[in-house]
Image: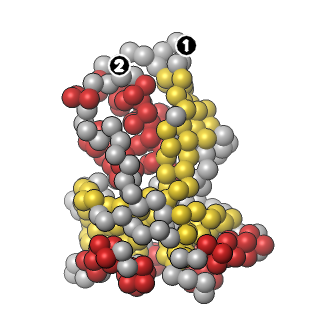
């Protein structure tokens, strides 16, 4: 069994477009308590099979979990198969890194399940091939991501916040949002240094002053409901869009206030979740 926690980005600054089509980022990731769960069992005929509790999740090679298993098998010459059952709690295509975290959890779980030699492991490199957020999801906690987001520096654990997540009920294509990102020439000044200082001091009040996400303007233009949702949630507390959207989060020190927002959104028919930050990295065995 392996937990796959969701993530939010306390900051996501787009620095510019790269020749390979990706964008250089400066982003601060934090894991959440909200998690999917993966279960591993033998596949009788040595194949890779996936079952999922959510019907909208694809079960073939387009699923990052299957791709992770396939990559590992090829890289380490594994002949055994696996059946993976994915219990889905994180909404899909929501900016919460659900697919990336499932892939990272598959890597962690399969290293154990298939008994891959620790000395031979290079999990961060395998993770980076699967997606820009997968290396962060391998260890979780609180980290600065640079490059595509895959070059990581661990940061002081994010102090505890109660987190309300809500989205307008549709997914957003990350590629589409980045494609629509206006190409500027000047490298923007980011506030990441101030955010990192607030993390180091464990200063919640300072920290919330430095929340930023450069993708918001693009997503709000493409999907005005996301901007409207952020406006609504901002009346309750510091709020920001997750990744490329469409989920918006609000941070609270007080659980009762967080609960009140969550209930109020649900009363309006908006999908909402109440969770917490999980800023401490788990010292797993997959990043050796
Ligand atoms: O790396 P991942 O597969 O998650 O990225 C999905 C898409 O998001 C990429 O194909 C790319 O269009 C865009 N992207 C980007 N710059 C990043 C990360 C993602 O342009 N740093």
| Residue 180 appears anywhere in the view | no
Count of marks placed on residues? 2
User: In this rendering, would 238 be left or right of 264?
Assistant: left
Q: Is residue 34 above or below residue 40?
A: below
Q: Which residue is mark 2?
A: 78
User: In this rendering, would 253 be left or right of 75?
Assistant: right
Which image quarter: residue 215?
A: bottom left
Q: Which residue is mark 1?
A: 44
Rendering coords of residue 206 (x, y %): 38, 84
Query: In front: 160, or 229?
Result: 160
Q: Are marks 2 and 1 in contact (CB under 8 Å)?
A: no
Which image quarter: residue 109?
A: top left
Q: Secondary structure at mark 2?
A: loop
Categorize mark 1 by other alpha carbons within 10 Å: few (<14), some (14-19), many (20+): few
Residue at coordinates 44% horizontally, 48% vertically from top-left?
Answer: 100
Q: Is residue 85 above or below residue 94?
A: above
């Amino acid at each position: 069994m392996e937990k796959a926690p969701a993530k939010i980005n306390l900051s996501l600054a787009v620095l510019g477009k790269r020749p390979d089509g990706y964008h250089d980022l400066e982003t601060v990731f934090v894991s959440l308590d909200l998690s999917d769960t993966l279960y591993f069992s033998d596949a009788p005929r040595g194949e890779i099979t996936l079952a999922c509790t959510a019907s909208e999740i694809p079960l073939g090679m387009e699923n990052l979990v299957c791709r992770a298993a396939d990559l590992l098998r090829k890289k380490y010459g594994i002949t055994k198969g696996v059946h993976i059952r994915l219990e889905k709690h994180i909404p899909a295509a929501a900016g919460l890194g659900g697919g990336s975290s499932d892939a990272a959890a598959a890597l962690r779980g399969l290293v154990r399940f298939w008994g891959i030699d620790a000395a031979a492991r290079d999990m961060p490199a395998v993770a980076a091939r699967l997606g820009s957020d997968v290396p962060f999801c391998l260890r979780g906690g609180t980290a600065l991501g640079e490059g595509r987001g895959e070059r990581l520096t661990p940061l002081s654990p994010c102090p505890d916040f109660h987190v309300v997540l809500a989205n307008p009920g549709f997914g957003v294509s990350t590629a589409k949002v980045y494609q629509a990102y206006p190409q500027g020439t000047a490298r923007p000044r980011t506030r990441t240094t101030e955010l990192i200082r607030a993390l180091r001091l464990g200063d919640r009040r300072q920290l919330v002053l430095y929340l930023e996400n450069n993708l918001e303007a693009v997503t709000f233009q493409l999907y005005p409901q996301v901007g409207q949702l952020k406006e609504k949630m901002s009346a309750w507390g510091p709020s920001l869009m997750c990744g490329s959207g469409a989920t918006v989060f609000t941070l609270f020190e007080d659980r009762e206030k967080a609960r009140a927002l969550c209930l109020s959104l649900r009363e309006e028919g908006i999908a909402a979740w109440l969770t917490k930050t999980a800023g401490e990295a788990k010292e797993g065995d997959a990043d050796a």
